[in-house]
Image (cartoon, rainbow, N blue to C red):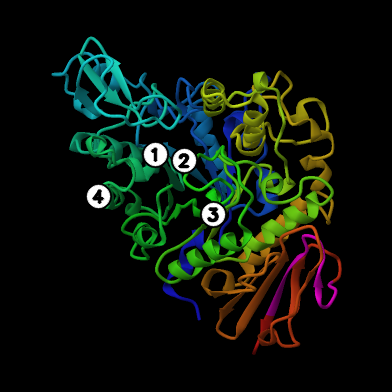
Amino acid sequence: MKTQNSCKWWKKTVVYQIYPKSFKDSNGDGIGDINGMIDRLDYLKDLGIGAVWLSPVCRSPQDDNGYDISDYQDIDPMFGTMEDMKRLIEEAGKRGIRIILDLVLNHTSDEHPWFKEAVKGKDNPYHDYYVWRDGEEGCPPNEMRACFGGSAWQWVPELGQYYFHQFSVKQPDLNWDNPKVREEIIRMINWWMDQGVGGFRLDVIDQIAKEPDLEITGNGPMLHAYIRELSRNTFQKGDLITVGEAWGANTENARVYSSPDGSEFSMVFQFEHSGLDQQPGKAKWDLAPLDFVKLKKVLAKWQTSLHEKGWNSLFWNNHDLPRIVSRWGNDGEYRVESAKMLATILYGMQGTPYLYQGEELAMTNVRFDISEYRDIEIMNMYRERLEMGFEKEEIMESIYAKGRDNARTPMQWDDTEHAGFTSGTPWLKVNPNYTEINAKKQINDQDSVFSYYKSLIRLRKTYDIFVEGDFRLLYEEDADIFAYVRSFGSQKILVAANFHGGTAAFKMPEEMGEKGRVLIGNYKNREDGILRPYEAFMILMDGE
């Protein structure tokens, strides 16, 4: 009972995200690099990874940790060279791992040659590669704000114009309405495809068709036309995985983005579930308890809405989000159990799972002094909120909970100095708990979080039901239990989990019958009628 889509390799694989600065340093300068990645490919192969998504490694002034690209067709020297990159692609390929490149196509660095030309004059052919508006100093075209704080408009006195930037002032937005910009991007992507990359993650791609005069950033009117043109001239020429970052995605436009006809992307990253622990209508820093019942319903909606009409990406973590075991699990007494529980819930669903570096070890959030953070978003927010009158303690609690540097502390390889990440001084402080939480300690431990992820990944490769099965949520209104059934032909899989630290009553659904067998669980034995703190398991029933 396989469908035509079963042959898509990315439907059965698990993607591992590497944050290059923090993964593995090979030369002692305190910054992770490409040769460090190559040194750890066997670790990823052992885990069962089929593709690796690299956060940006292209040449960059690093104003926003590489998301400000100054040359799309070169590697930043802090990470290595193009020859290193080619070797990474080759060595990963030998191990059955494809390399996914992170491309930032909404904006460039202000140090990109295009922008350096653009500021030379209004008649320069590159001027229209960016978004400009005439004006007077001190009177920007409108009140739009940049995501990192301040106005979204930057005055250039030599031109008597403002340029538009949705993020840092050093990240001017590209003008996708200019066909020459789109041609340049298509040419560049095809060049990377010729280098052998296995796919692309497209940063804030839903913002490329902005209409700043109307204060529209995401989902502009030309968005899907531009994406289809891009896909037709690039992605569709190869057997690639493509995932667009789309903070404004809903189930309706996600079916367009990830249509089975392949006209746009393989899938998108949507973030509806990621905003459920903040105050409605406010910033991510305005903390609120997680609405657990809503979390279940949101994830279920995405499962049912995209079934046979699109494809989901599955993730708890990435480089922009706090560590999930600290956020929605328990990073103290039940760190191991809750990390396995969160993995069980996610890996039973339909979609392609994304595993962020260190998640397979249940790495945790950090509580640094403000002077020890490095993220531009944290520093800008801290300054702005102090000026607004917030108490320092309240600001720091928000940073401890949601700061992006939680995810960016160096990978914890072993219990030697700096967690085996570097022989030098790390660019960002290592989490002090590395002596207890590290890869060396977990790789050969059959009860470790690492081994549990390894088993989950193997299960997803073994059973087609994970790719093809439909989804039905159970215990919809229950305050503790997350349970659902996947069905495909004669097979059913029950996934059941206690999301919290108490004991919850649980009755097996009758449809699972008596023949089910436990595929995986985070306690050694099941107890009928209850789920213990953070307990989770998968049971397979085959009717044949």
Of the image marks 3 and 2, the number of the one nearer the N terminus: 2
Nearer mark to the viewer, of 3 and 2: 3
Residue 209 in view: yes
Question: Circle 3: is it few (<14), some (14-19), or many (20+) Cα within 10 Å?
Answer: some
Question: What secondary structure is found at the residue carrying circle 4?
Answer: helix
Q: Residue at x 77, y 66 (%)?
A: 521
Relative to residue 479, is residue 473 drawn left or right?
left
| Distance (Cα) linking label 3 and label 1 | 33 Å
Nearer mark to the viewer, of 3 and 1: 3
| Residue under label 4 | 229
Question: Circle 1: is it few (<14), some (14-19), or many (20+) Cα within 10 Å?
Answer: some
Q: Position of residue 107 (x, y in %)?
A: 35, 31
Of the image marks 1 and 4, the number of the one nearer the N terminus: 1
Residue 36 in view: no
* Disc 2 to disc 1: CB gap under 8 Å: yes
Question: What secondary structure is found at the residue carrying circle 3?
Answer: helix
Q: Which residues are magenta?
A: 526-540
Q: Position of residue 90 (x, y in %)?
A: 53, 41
Of the image marks 3 and 1, the number of the one nearer the N terminus: 1
* Amino acid at dot 4: Glu
Question: What secondary structure is found at the residue carrying circle 2?
Answer: strand
Taking the view exactly as shown, the residue that stands out farthest to the left is 123
Of the image marks 2 and 1, the number of the one nearer the N terminus: 2
* Amino acid at dot 3: His
| Residue under label 2 | 101
Question: Circle 2: is it few (<14), some (14-19), or many (20+) Cα within 10 Å?
Answer: many
| Residue under label 3 | 273
